[in-house]
Image: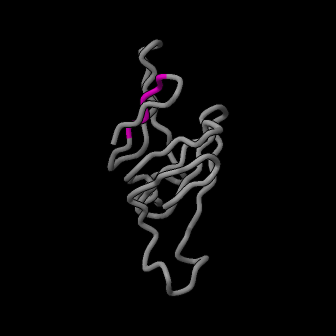
Amino acid sequence: MIYEDRFGILWIGTQNGLYKYNALENTIKLIPFGNFKRNAVLNIIRCIYEDNNGLLWIGTFDGLIRLNPFNGSYRHYILKKQVTNEIPNNLIISIHGKKSQVFL
């Protein structure tokens, strides 16, 4: 999965994590989420969406991540634990949005 944000940065989602590629600086950087070895499924990237504020929403095998690309901070949302019996797992395969809303 490859996503180009509004600044021309390429975000490359793989089975081994999220990579940030800056063509102007010719740099690539791994963006690990949590303890990389212990949370391997959290680092299997399925989809990427950029909202109106420039935040990246990242779908993984273990929930949703909201990444602030400006400072590198992120928050992990585990959906299965928050909604009883309605969501069978934490796999996020598609993210879409409209204005300030994000749809999974």
Q: Judge from the rendering whether residue 36 lies leftward or rightward of residue 77; answer left or right.
A: left
**Front residue (pair 99, 46):** 99
Residue at 63% of width from left, 53% of height from top? 75
Residue 13's quadrant in the figure?
top left
> How many labels, in total?
0
**Place of residue 89 in the rendered image (x, y in percent of width and height, measured from the top left):** 43, 75
Name the residue at the bottom extreme.
85
Q: Quadrant of the N terminus?
A: top left
Residue 88's quadrant in the figure?
bottom left
Residue interval drawn in magenta? 8-12
**Place of residue 14 in the rendered image (x, y in percent of width and height, measured from the top left):** 34, 45
Q: Judge from the rendering whether residue 89 lies leftward or rightward of residue 52; answer left or right.
A: left
Q: Judge from the rendering whether residue 46 lies leftward or rightward of residue 85; answer left or right.
A: left
Residue at 35% of width from left, 47% of height from top? 16
**Place of residue 19 in the rendered image (x, y in percent of width and height, measured from the top left):** 42, 36
Residue at 64% of width from left, 31% of height from top? 70
Name the residue at the top extreme.
24
**Front residue (pair 31, 63):** 63
Residue at 58% of width from left, 79% of height from top? 83
**Place of residue 21 in the rendered image (x, y in percent of width and height, measured from the top left):** 43, 26
Residue 18's quadrant in the figure?
top left
Vertical comparison of 2 with 36: above or below: above
Magenta-colored segment: predominant secondary structure: strand
Magenta segment includes 54? no
